[in-house]
């Protein structure tokens, strides 16, 4: 499943969520390299993001807009599942100091043979 076979599903999903909350650009870049294949692609309802550099730019924009700009955090929500090379997780976004959930979503990740994210579908 994950790059490190001893890593469990929950740890992998947690690392995925942490990249969205990462304040340090260098750490964010490293976390992206640790999770996504070099040519990994992310699909949203309105965009396709190709490659680690484009993913870095997208995640940085989300960080600046939501985490830093609105004091929100992204976290896992509900059950995370895996099936062969696919991982399904749910997320929510809420105020860092507590409060009502501001957004939710579902993510489907398809991993390559090395356990890196090849395709990332965000719903």
Image (spheres, grey):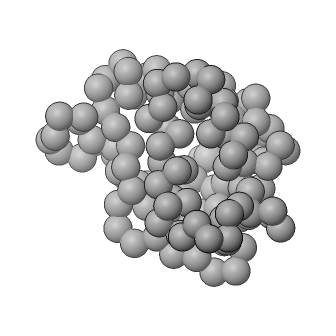
Residue 52 screen position, x and y as percent = 76, 36
In this rendering, is residue 36 above or below 23?
below
Q: What residue is drawn where x is 38% and y is 28%? A: 67
Residue 114 screen position, x and y as percent = 81, 62
Residues 19 and 44: in front is 19
Q: Is residue 24 left or right of residue 50?
A: left
In this rendering, is residue 76 above or below 53?
below
Residue 1 in sight here? yes
Residue 49 in sight here? no
Counting every numbered tag in the picture gives: 0
Residue 107 screen position, x and y as percent = 54, 59
Q: Is residue 76 left or right of residue 41?
A: left
Residue 65 screen position, x and y as percent = 43, 22
Q: Is residue 83 left or right of residue 11?
A: right
Residues 2 and 41: in front is 2
- The quarter of the picture where residue 112 lies is bottom right
Q: Is residue 30 left or right of residue 118?
A: left
- The quarter of the picture where residue 116 lies is bottom right
Q: What residue is drawn where x is 58% and y is 29%? A: 27
**Quarter of the picture holding the N terminus:** bottom right
In this rendering, is residue 30 above or below 7?
above
In this rendering, is residue 105 above or below 23?
below
Q: What residue is drawn where x is 24% and y is 34%? A: 96
Q: What residue is drawn where x is 79% and y is 49%? A: 37
Extreme residue in the bottom direction: 83
């Amino acid at each position: 499943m994950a790059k490190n076979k001893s890593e469990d599903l929950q740890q992998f999903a947690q690392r995925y969520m942490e990249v969205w909350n990462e304040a340090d650009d260098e750490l964010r870049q490293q976390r992206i390299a640790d999770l996504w294949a070099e040519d990994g692609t992310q699909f949203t309802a309105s965009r396709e993001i190709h490659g680690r550099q484009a993913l870095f730019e997208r995640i940085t924009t989300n960080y600046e807009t939501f985490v830093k700009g609105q004091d929100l955090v992204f976290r896992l929500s509900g059950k995370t599942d895996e099936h062969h090379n696919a991982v399904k997780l749910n997320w929510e976004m809420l105020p860092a100091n507590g409060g009502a959930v501001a957004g939710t979503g579902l993510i489907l990740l398809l991993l390559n043979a090395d356990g890196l994210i090849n395709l990332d579908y965000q719903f």
